[in-house]
Image (cartoon, grey):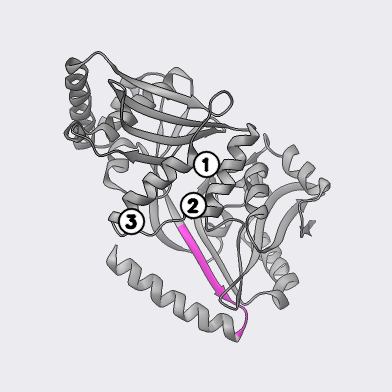
Amino acid sequence: MYTFKIFETITEECKNIWKSGENKMSSTFFQDIGYIEEVIKNNNSKVKIVVVYYKKIVIAILPLEIKDLLFIRVLQWIGTEFSDYCNPILSKNFKSNFNKKDFLSVWNLILNEMKDELDLVFLNNQLALVNGQPNPFVECLESQFFSKIYSIEIGSEFLEYKESIKKKNKKHAYEIHRIQIKQEKLKKLSEHLNLDIKESSRDNIDFNKIVDEKKKQLYKKNISNKLNKNFKKIFNNLIISKKKNFYLISLVYENKVLSKCFGFVYANTFYYYIPVVLPNSFNNYKPGKILIIQLIEWCIQNKIAKFDFGLGNEKYKKYFSNKEISLHRYLNFFSLRGLLAYSYISVLLKIKKLWL
Protein backbone atom coordinates (compact mmCIF):
# COMPACT_ATOMS: atom_id res chain seq x y z
CA MET A 1 0.00 0.00 0.00
CA TYR A 2 2.79 2.43 0.99
CA THR A 3 5.96 2.57 -1.08
CA PHE A 4 8.85 5.00 -1.38
CA LYS A 5 11.67 5.87 -3.74
CA ILE A 6 14.99 7.50 -2.79
CA PHE A 7 16.59 9.94 -5.25
CA GLU A 8 20.30 10.70 -4.80
CA THR A 9 20.19 13.52 -7.36
CA ILE A 10 17.39 15.75 -8.58
CA THR A 11 16.61 13.87 -11.77
CA GLU A 12 13.97 14.98 -14.27
CA GLU A 13 11.60 12.43 -12.72
CA CYS A 14 12.21 13.85 -9.24
CA LYS A 15 11.82 17.43 -10.48
CA ASN A 16 8.56 16.62 -12.28
CA ILE A 17 7.13 14.97 -9.15
CA TRP A 18 8.14 18.01 -7.08
CA LYS A 19 6.76 20.57 -9.52
CA SER A 20 3.50 18.70 -10.09
CA GLY A 21 2.87 18.83 -6.35
CA GLU A 22 3.54 22.57 -5.93
CA ASN A 23 -0.15 23.53 -5.79
CA LYS A 24 -1.34 20.30 -4.20
CA MET A 25 1.09 19.96 -1.30
CA SER A 26 1.96 21.92 1.85
CA SER A 27 5.42 23.38 2.38
CA THR A 28 7.32 26.63 2.93
CA PHE A 29 9.75 28.61 0.77
CA PHE A 30 12.61 26.52 2.17
CA GLN A 31 11.21 23.38 0.49
CA ASP A 32 10.78 25.05 -2.90
CA ILE A 33 12.55 23.07 -5.66
CA GLY A 34 14.48 26.16 -6.87
CA TYR A 35 15.80 26.89 -3.38
CA ILE A 36 16.68 23.23 -2.75
CA GLU A 37 18.59 23.01 -6.05
CA GLU A 38 20.68 26.07 -5.16
CA VAL A 39 21.41 24.69 -1.70
CA ILE A 40 22.57 21.36 -3.17
CA LYS A 41 24.95 23.19 -5.55
CA ASN A 42 26.59 24.94 -2.59
CA ASN A 43 26.44 22.17 -0.02
CA ASN A 44 28.82 19.23 0.12
CA SER A 45 26.48 16.41 1.10
CA LYS A 46 24.88 13.16 -0.10
CA VAL A 47 21.34 13.88 -1.32
CA LYS A 48 18.58 11.55 -0.10
CA ILE A 49 15.25 12.85 -1.41
CA VAL A 50 12.52 10.39 -0.45
CA VAL A 51 9.20 10.33 -2.30
CA VAL A 52 6.46 8.47 -0.40
CA TYR A 53 3.49 6.97 -2.27
CA TYR A 54 0.08 5.74 -1.17
CA LYS A 55 -1.51 3.57 -3.87
CA LYS A 56 0.92 5.11 -6.41
CA ILE A 57 -0.13 8.67 -5.42
CA VAL A 58 2.56 10.96 -3.98
CA ILE A 59 1.65 11.88 -0.39
CA ALA A 60 5.00 13.22 0.87
CA ILE A 61 8.42 14.38 -0.30
CA LEU A 62 11.23 14.27 2.27
CA PRO A 63 14.17 16.48 1.16
CA LEU A 64 16.94 14.83 3.19
CA GLU A 65 20.73 14.68 2.97
CA ILE A 66 23.58 12.91 4.72
CA LYS A 67 26.35 15.29 5.70
CA ASP A 68 29.78 14.57 7.17
CA LEU A 69 30.19 16.76 10.24
CA LEU A 70 33.46 16.15 12.12
CA PHE A 71 33.59 12.49 11.01
CA ILE A 72 29.94 11.92 11.99
CA ARG A 73 27.54 11.07 9.16
CA VAL A 74 24.37 13.03 9.94
CA LEU A 75 20.98 12.58 8.29
CA GLN A 76 19.30 15.98 8.22
CA TRP A 77 16.95 18.11 6.14
CA ILE A 78 18.63 19.58 3.05
CA GLY A 79 20.09 23.00 3.81
CA THR A 80 19.50 22.89 7.57
CA GLU A 81 22.39 25.35 8.05
CA PHE A 82 20.75 27.96 5.81
CA SER A 83 17.01 27.40 6.28
CA ASP A 84 14.59 28.84 8.81
CA TYR A 85 12.15 25.94 8.50
CA CYS A 86 12.98 22.31 7.69
CA ASN A 87 9.95 20.17 6.92
CA PRO A 88 8.52 17.41 4.78
CA ILE A 89 6.34 18.41 1.84
CA LEU A 90 2.90 16.94 2.52
CA SER A 91 -0.13 16.26 0.34
CA LYS A 92 -3.15 18.25 1.51
CA ASN A 93 -4.95 15.06 2.55
CA PHE A 94 -1.84 13.52 4.11
CA LYS A 95 -3.36 12.99 7.57
CA SER A 96 -6.33 11.03 6.21
CA ASN A 97 -4.02 8.64 4.33
CA PHE A 98 -1.24 8.24 6.87
CA ASN A 99 -1.75 7.54 10.58
CA LYS A 100 0.99 7.34 13.22
CA LYS A 101 1.45 3.58 12.85
CA ASP A 102 1.79 3.90 9.07
CA PHE A 103 4.24 6.78 9.37
CA LEU A 104 6.51 4.98 11.84
CA SER A 105 6.47 1.84 9.70
CA VAL A 106 7.50 3.72 6.54
CA TRP A 107 10.03 5.92 8.37
CA ASN A 108 11.74 2.86 9.88
CA LEU A 109 11.93 1.24 6.44
CA ILE A 110 13.52 4.43 5.04
CA LEU A 111 16.08 4.50 7.86
CA ASN A 112 16.81 0.81 7.33
CA GLU A 113 17.72 1.60 3.70
CA MET A 114 20.26 4.18 4.91
CA LYS A 115 21.49 2.59 8.14
CA ASP A 116 24.97 1.71 6.80
CA GLU A 117 25.49 5.29 5.61
CA LEU A 118 24.71 7.25 8.78
CA ASP A 119 25.63 7.60 12.45
CA LEU A 120 23.12 10.20 13.61
CA VAL A 121 19.71 11.61 12.70
CA PHE A 122 19.32 15.28 13.59
CA LEU A 123 16.15 16.89 12.23
CA ASN A 124 16.16 20.54 13.30
CA ASN A 125 13.93 23.62 12.87
CA GLN A 126 10.76 21.60 12.30
CA LEU A 127 7.42 23.40 12.39
CA ALA A 128 4.72 21.65 14.42
CA LEU A 129 2.28 22.58 11.66
CA VAL A 130 3.01 22.72 7.93
CA ASN A 131 0.44 25.09 6.42
CA GLY A 132 -2.07 24.00 9.05
CA GLN A 133 -1.32 20.28 8.83
CA PRO A 134 0.33 18.42 11.73
CA ASN A 135 3.95 17.63 10.93
CA PRO A 136 4.35 13.83 11.34
CA PHE A 137 8.03 14.25 12.27
CA VAL A 138 6.86 16.26 15.28
CA GLU A 139 3.61 14.45 16.03
CA CYS A 140 4.85 10.86 15.64
CA LEU A 141 8.52 10.99 16.70
CA GLU A 142 9.87 11.93 20.13
CA SER A 143 10.78 15.44 19.03
CA GLN A 144 11.65 18.22 21.47
CA PHE A 145 10.17 21.71 21.52
CA PHE A 146 12.85 24.41 21.56
CA SER A 147 11.34 27.68 20.34
CA LYS A 148 8.35 29.51 18.89
CA ILE A 149 8.02 31.38 15.63
CA TYR A 150 5.64 34.24 15.06
CA SER A 151 3.48 35.29 12.13
CA ILE A 152 0.51 37.48 11.23
CA GLU A 153 -2.74 36.40 9.60
CA ILE A 154 -3.25 39.81 8.09
CA GLY A 155 -6.86 40.25 6.97
CA SER A 156 -8.19 42.79 4.49
CA GLU A 157 -7.73 46.00 6.54
CA PHE A 158 -5.18 47.31 9.02
CA LEU A 159 -7.96 48.00 11.54
CA GLU A 160 -9.01 44.34 11.31
CA TYR A 161 -5.41 43.32 12.02
CA LYS A 162 -5.22 45.67 15.04
CA GLU A 163 -8.45 44.22 16.42
CA SER A 164 -6.98 40.72 16.20
CA ILE A 165 -4.00 41.90 18.28
CA LYS A 166 -6.30 43.59 20.79
CA LYS A 167 -8.24 40.35 21.29
CA LYS A 168 -4.99 38.48 21.86
CA ASN A 169 -3.28 40.99 24.17
CA LYS A 170 -4.28 44.60 24.92
CA LYS A 171 -0.72 45.46 25.95
CA HIS A 172 0.56 44.40 22.53
CA ALA A 173 -2.17 46.42 20.80
CA TYR A 174 -1.14 49.47 22.82
CA GLU A 175 2.51 48.98 21.78
CA ILE A 176 1.49 49.00 18.10
CA HIS A 177 -0.57 52.15 18.74
CA ARG A 178 2.53 53.81 20.28
CA ILE A 179 4.57 52.97 17.17
CA GLN A 180 1.87 54.49 14.97
CA ILE A 181 2.07 57.70 17.06
CA LYS A 182 5.86 57.78 16.56
CA GLN A 183 5.30 57.30 12.84
CA GLU A 184 2.94 60.28 12.74
CA LYS A 185 5.43 62.43 14.67
CA LEU A 186 8.15 61.54 12.20
CA LYS A 187 5.84 62.42 9.30
CA LYS A 188 5.17 65.83 10.85
CA LEU A 189 8.89 66.62 10.79
CA SER A 190 8.88 66.11 7.04
CA GLU A 191 6.54 64.93 4.32
CA HIS A 192 9.36 62.85 2.86
CA LEU A 193 8.88 59.60 4.80
CA ASN A 194 8.24 56.74 2.43
CA LEU A 195 8.88 53.14 1.51
CA ASP A 196 11.44 52.47 -1.21
CA ILE A 197 10.61 49.11 -2.76
CA LYS A 198 13.07 47.28 -4.99
CA GLU A 199 11.81 44.09 -6.62
CA SER A 200 14.21 41.52 -8.09
CA SER A 201 12.21 41.12 -11.32
CA ARG A 202 12.89 44.74 -12.31
CA ASP A 203 15.54 46.25 -9.97
CA ASN A 204 19.07 45.49 -8.85
CA ILE A 205 19.14 44.26 -5.25
CA ASP A 206 22.41 44.57 -3.34
CA PHE A 207 21.99 41.43 -1.26
CA ASN A 208 25.61 41.33 -0.10
CA LYS A 209 25.35 44.80 1.42
CA ILE A 210 22.35 44.06 3.64
CA VAL A 211 23.88 40.71 4.69
CA ASP A 212 27.12 42.46 5.71
CA GLU A 213 25.15 45.11 7.63
CA LYS A 214 23.21 42.39 9.44
CA LYS A 215 26.37 40.41 10.23
CA LYS A 216 27.95 43.53 11.72
CA GLN A 217 24.95 44.05 14.01
CA LEU A 218 24.89 40.39 15.09
CA TYR A 219 28.64 40.41 15.72
CA LYS A 220 28.28 43.39 18.07
CA LYS A 221 25.65 41.43 20.02
CA ASN A 222 27.85 38.30 20.00
CA ILE A 223 25.13 36.32 18.15
CA SER A 224 26.16 33.46 15.86
CA ASN A 225 24.62 33.42 12.39
CA LYS A 226 24.31 31.51 9.11
CA LEU A 227 25.25 34.48 6.88
CA ASN A 228 28.36 32.98 5.29
CA LYS A 229 29.62 33.05 1.68
CA ASN A 230 27.53 29.99 0.70
CA PHE A 231 24.40 31.65 2.09
CA LYS A 232 25.18 34.74 -0.01
CA LYS A 233 25.80 32.63 -3.10
CA ILE A 234 22.51 30.73 -2.75
CA PHE A 235 20.38 33.87 -2.51
CA ASN A 236 22.34 35.86 -5.09
CA ASN A 237 21.76 33.04 -7.59
CA LEU A 238 18.05 32.93 -6.74
CA ILE A 239 17.76 36.71 -7.13
CA ILE A 240 19.58 36.69 -10.48
CA SER A 241 17.38 33.86 -11.78
CA LYS A 242 14.29 36.12 -11.37
CA LYS A 243 12.14 33.02 -10.78
CA LYS A 244 10.86 34.30 -7.43
CA ASN A 245 9.86 37.72 -6.11
CA PHE A 246 12.56 39.04 -3.78
CA TYR A 247 12.34 42.50 -2.26
CA LEU A 248 14.59 45.04 -0.62
CA ILE A 249 12.25 47.42 1.19
CA SER A 250 13.61 50.52 2.94
CA LEU A 251 12.08 53.14 5.21
CA VAL A 252 13.48 56.39 3.81
CA TYR A 253 13.38 59.79 5.51
CA GLU A 254 14.56 62.70 3.36
CA ASN A 255 16.79 60.42 1.23
CA LYS A 256 18.25 58.74 4.33
CA VAL A 257 17.59 55.02 4.91
CA LEU A 258 16.49 54.50 8.54
CA SER A 259 15.68 50.79 8.37
CA LYS A 260 15.29 48.12 5.73
CA CYS A 261 14.41 44.51 5.14
CA PHE A 262 15.24 41.84 2.59
CA GLY A 263 12.24 39.59 2.14
CA PHE A 264 10.30 37.53 -0.37
CA VAL A 265 6.80 36.38 -1.21
CA TYR A 266 6.01 32.68 -1.49
CA ALA A 267 2.60 30.98 -1.43
CA ASN A 268 0.92 34.30 -0.56
CA THR A 269 3.21 34.76 2.45
CA PHE A 270 5.68 37.60 2.96
CA TYR A 271 8.87 36.38 4.64
CA TYR A 272 10.44 39.13 6.77
CA TYR A 273 13.88 37.62 6.36
CA ILE A 274 16.80 40.00 6.97
CA PRO A 275 15.81 43.20 8.81
CA VAL A 276 18.35 45.92 9.58
CA VAL A 277 17.99 49.13 11.59
CA LEU A 278 20.75 51.54 10.61
CA PRO A 279 22.34 53.73 13.30
CA ASN A 280 20.98 57.27 12.98
CA SER A 281 19.62 60.18 15.00
CA PHE A 282 16.02 58.96 14.49
CA ASN A 283 16.37 55.66 16.36
CA ASN A 284 14.16 56.98 19.19
CA TYR A 285 11.28 56.92 16.70
CA LYS A 286 11.69 53.12 16.37
CA PRO A 287 12.22 53.03 12.57
CA GLY A 288 12.46 49.21 12.55
CA LYS A 289 8.97 48.89 14.01
CA ILE A 290 7.59 51.67 11.78
CA LEU A 291 8.91 49.67 8.83
CA ILE A 292 6.98 46.60 10.04
CA ILE A 293 3.74 48.62 10.21
CA GLN A 294 4.31 49.92 6.69
CA LEU A 295 5.14 46.43 5.46
CA ILE A 296 1.89 45.08 6.93
CA GLU A 297 0.00 47.86 5.12
CA TRP A 298 1.90 47.01 1.91
CA CYS A 299 0.88 43.35 2.32
CA ILE A 300 -2.77 44.37 2.75
CA GLN A 301 -2.60 46.53 -0.41
CA ASN A 302 -1.11 43.62 -2.36
CA LYS A 303 -3.57 41.05 -0.93
CA ILE A 304 -0.80 39.03 0.74
CA ALA A 305 -2.48 36.89 3.39
CA LYS A 306 0.36 36.13 5.80
CA PHE A 307 3.44 37.85 7.26
CA ASP A 308 6.13 35.46 8.55
CA PHE A 309 8.77 36.77 10.99
CA GLY A 310 11.05 33.74 10.53
CA LEU A 311 13.44 32.27 13.07
CA GLY A 312 14.02 34.10 16.32
CA ASN A 313 11.76 34.82 19.29
CA GLU A 314 12.57 38.51 19.70
CA LYS A 315 10.04 40.36 21.84
CA TYR A 316 8.87 42.73 19.09
CA LYS A 317 7.76 39.77 16.94
CA LYS A 318 5.46 38.59 19.70
CA TYR A 319 3.93 42.09 19.95
CA PHE A 320 3.09 42.27 16.24
CA SER A 321 1.97 38.67 15.70
CA ASN A 322 -1.46 37.13 16.06
CA LYS A 323 -0.30 33.56 15.49
CA GLU A 324 2.51 31.42 16.86
CA ILE A 325 3.76 27.93 16.00
CA SER A 326 6.25 25.80 17.91
CA LEU A 327 9.57 24.61 16.50
CA HIS A 328 10.91 21.15 17.30
CA ARG A 329 14.02 19.03 16.80
CA TYR A 330 14.55 15.27 16.70
CA LEU A 331 17.78 13.48 17.58
CA ASN A 332 18.65 9.77 17.37
CA PHE A 333 21.75 7.61 16.82
CA PHE A 334 22.63 4.59 14.66
CA SER A 335 26.20 3.72 15.62
CA LEU A 336 28.68 3.99 18.48
CA ARG A 337 30.05 7.21 16.98
CA GLY A 338 26.48 8.39 16.66
CA LEU A 339 25.82 7.59 20.34
CA LEU A 340 28.84 9.67 21.40
CA ALA A 341 27.70 12.56 19.20
CA TYR A 342 24.11 12.15 20.48
CA SER A 343 25.29 12.42 24.11
CA TYR A 344 27.47 15.45 23.37
CA ILE A 345 24.78 17.32 21.39
CA SER A 346 22.12 16.52 24.03
CA VAL A 347 24.28 18.10 26.74
CA LEU A 348 24.98 21.16 24.55
CA LEU A 349 21.27 21.64 23.83
CA LYS A 350 20.39 21.39 27.53
CA ILE A 351 23.04 24.01 28.39
CA LYS A 352 21.77 26.28 25.62
CA LYS A 353 18.20 25.91 26.93
CA LEU A 354 19.34 27.01 30.40
CA TRP A 355 20.80 30.21 28.93
CA LEU A 356 17.71 31.11 26.89
- SS category of the residue bearing label 2: loop
Asked whether the residues under the numbered discs 3 and 2 touch, taking CB atoms below 8 Å apart as contact, a structural biologist would say no
* Residue 132, numbered label: 1
Magenta stretch prevailing secondary structure: strand
The residue indicated by pointer 2 is 128
Which mark is first along the chain, 1 or 3?
1
**Residue in view at x 41 percent, y 22 percent:** 298
Asked whether the residues under the numbered discs 2 and 1 touch, taking CB atoms below 8 Å apart as contact, a structural biologist would say no
Q: Is residue 187 magenta?
A: no
Q: Is residue 182 visible?
A: yes
| Magenta range | 328-335
Label 1 crowd bin: few (<14), some (14–19), many (20+), radius 10 Å = few
- SS category of the residue bearing label 3: helix
* Residue 219, numbered label: 3
Nearer-the-camera pick, 328 or 70: 70
The three-letter amino acid code for the residue at tag 3 is Tyr
* Whole-number angstrom distance, CA of label 2 to CA of label 1: 9 Å
The three-letter amino acid code for the residue at tag 1 is Gly
**Residue in view at x 48 percent, y 21 percent:** 303
**Residue in view at x 59 percent, y 47 percent:** 234
Which mark is first along the chain, 2 or 3?
2
Q: Quadrant of the N terminus?
A: bottom right
Rendered view: 346 above or below 44: below
Where residue 111 sits: x, y (%)? 69, 70
Rendered view: 186 above or below 275: above
Q: Is residue 312 visible?
A: no
Asked whether the residues under the numbered discs 3 and 1 touch, taking CB atoms below 8 Å apart as contact, a structural biologist would say no
Q: Is residue 331 magenta?
A: yes
